[in-house]
Image (cartoon, rainbow, N blue to C red):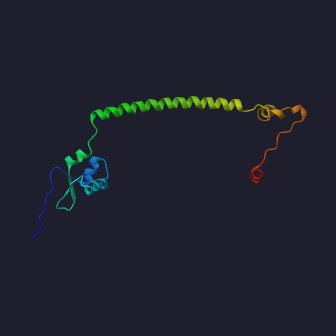
């Protein structure tokens, strides 16, 4: 004799539909079923069906109040980002000014800045020899 197919209960969802509604993965629903927190029944198509009401209990939709809180938090974050952008702009400008101040205008000011004890050009002071990378490694 033929197999009698039982239609799914009207308020039931397939696991894929339930996962989409809950905002989780099907694997998460399987875990809940294994732990006994989510019951299911098999339809005539051998698919698992879960109660839509139980999915809403386990994964409640955000309330209107929570949405308002999120909007407020989003606005605060926007303001914080704007403040940080302004601080970054001010710090960048200050850094550019410092770089301009640091750049020596001539050899004498370079020597004065880095080797004040050897900055007297009239005495025939030589610029210290810069060590190359190989000399630094060999010590």
Residue lying at the far front in this picture: please name it.
35
Give the tally of numbered discs: 0
Residue lying at the far bottom in this picture: please name it.
1
Q: In what quadrant of the picture does the N terminus appear? A: bottom left
- Residue 58 location in percent, x, y? 25, 46
110 left or right of 5 in image: right
Residue sitting at x 27%, y 55%: 35
Residue lying at the far right in this picture: please name it.
123
Residue sitting at x 48%, y 30%: 82
Residue sitting at x 28%, y 47%: 22
- Residue 93 location in percent, x, y? 60, 29
* Quarter of the figure with residue 61: top left
Residue lying at the far left in this picture: please name it.
1
- Residue 32 location in percent, x, y? 27, 53
38 left or right of 125 in image: left
Residue sitting at x 27%, y 36%: 63
Question: Where 7 sits versus 22, above or below?
Answer: below
* Quarter of the figure with residue 90: top right
Q: Of 112 and 104, which appears nearest the observer?
A: 112
């Amino acid at each position: 004799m033929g197999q009698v197919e039982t239609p799914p209960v009207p308020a039931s969802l397939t696991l894929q539909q339930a996962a989409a509604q809950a905002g989780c993965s099907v694997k998460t629903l399987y875990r809940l079923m294994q732990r006994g927190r989510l019951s299911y029944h098999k339809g005539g198509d051998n698919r698992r069906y879960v109660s839509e009401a139980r999915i809403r209990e386990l994964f409640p939709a955000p309330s209107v109040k929570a949405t308002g809180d999120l909007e407020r938090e989003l606005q605060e974050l926007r303001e914080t980002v704007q403040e940080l952008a302004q601080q970054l702009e001010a710090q960048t400008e200050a850094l550019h000014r410092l770089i301009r101040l640091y750049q020596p205008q001539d050899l004498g000011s370079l020597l004065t800045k880095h080797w004040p004890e050897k900055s007297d050009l009239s005495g025939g002071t030589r610029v210290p020899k810069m060590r190359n990378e190989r000399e630094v490694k060999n010590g």
